[in-house]
Image: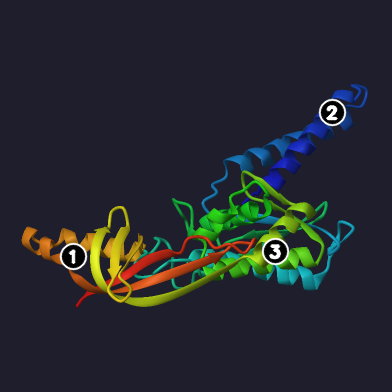
Amino acid sequence: MVVKANLDALRSEIATVERMLSRKSSKSPLGRKSLERRLENLRALLDDGVSSPDQHASVALIFDGDPVVGAKSINMGFASQALKQYQDLIQSVISQGSDEQAAPPRRGRTKSSPPPGELFISGVMHGSFGFVLEEDSSQLELLNTRTKEAVVSADNFLQTTSSPEADFDQLLSEVDTKVFQRLRAFIRTLHDADAVLRISERDRTISLDAKNLSVAHERVMRSDILERETVMRGWLIGFSPVKRTFDFRDAETDTLVTGKVSPFMALQTLQTLQELTEHDEAQAMSLGRRYVANIHIKDVERADGTPLPTRYTLLSLTPE
């Protein structure tokens, strides 16, 4: 698999060889023929890279700054810590909000296949010092793997966190505690080591320079996410498994709680409704009826100390 940095390097080398050919005298047929063969090979490599399937995860982490010595070596302690933290971030993105019972198994996976999110070092890159990370591609996939989707999401989180213009509040509202903690750990490692990073995927490169990492570090170190589950008793006022919304009046505080229905509960409810008769459907989820509700609560504190609105997610309902 090929990342954008590889393709860019091939294009740059092709341009260099083409310039050399344009200057090569016809009086040097051997030298000219050698350059033509080189150009043909480079173009073939580029064509293969552009046309190769990319359903599996492939990303290059290219480091620079204090941990990198010249373009040939990198501090081992920093590199091992940063790579592990990036791996942890990918795996936390995959597990965020997932329920194994709700997720259908992907075809082609076997018991011996690596778990989703596991990456392998498949090469190094010079010019700074980079590592090419790939997932196991021995299984044929028709759609993008969960690991590839997680890599794209994690890189989006890093880009949003480090960009002063990006909506960091939206990111805080989307990620769970584990993802945020691992995002924070990775950014702190880069910042404390005075490192800079380029992330090269198949079709894009994300640059985290010293200024970007300073913004990201301040944001993640001064923000926080607190999550908990609670049980409420009261009345179901509104419920839509399609729109994934609910309204519930808490009997103890007489307050109206509004939020989202969890993906698993919404799917389970829709499947149940499809199997019910018209009479049973009317009794299945009665508005105004008393229930015991299991609710996930998420509180977010911004970097400036102000809170975001509390988010409620309905996990289950049991009739009283």
Please tell me whether mark 3 or mark 1 is closer to you in this view.
1
Q: Position of residue 198 (x, y in %)?
A: 73, 52
Q: Is residue 88 visible?
A: no
Front-most of 63 and 166?
Answer: 166
Element carrying mark 2 = helix
Please tell me whether mark 1 or mark 2 is closer to you in this view.
1
Disc 1 marks which amino acid?
Gly
Residue located 25% across and 59% down the image = 238
Q: Position of residue 67 (x, y in %)?
A: 84, 64
Residue located 79% across and 32% down the image = 15
Disc 2 marks which amino acid?
Arg
Front-most of 277 and 285?
Answer: 285
Pointer 3 local density, CA inside 10 Å: few below 14, some 14–19, many at least 20: many
Label placed on residue 163: none
Q: Is residue 54 visible?
A: yes
Label placed on residue 288: 1
Q: Is the residue 179 above or below the residue 9 in the image?
A: below
Q: Earlier in the sequence, mark 1 or mark 2?
A: 2
What residue would you read off at disc 2?
19
Element carrying mark 3 = helix
Q: Position of residue 249 (x, y in %)?
A: 28, 67
* 1 and 2 marks in contact (CB < 8 Å): no
Pointer 2 local density, CA inside 10 Å: few below 14, some 14–19, many at least 20: few
Q: Is residue 260 left or right of residue 111?
A: left
Q: Position of residue 316 (x, y in %)?
A: 30, 71
Q: Quadrant of residue 69?
A: bottom right
Disc 3 marks which amino acid?
Ile
State how far apart marks 2 and 3 are (Cα).
Answer: 41 Å
What residue would you read off at disc 3?
187
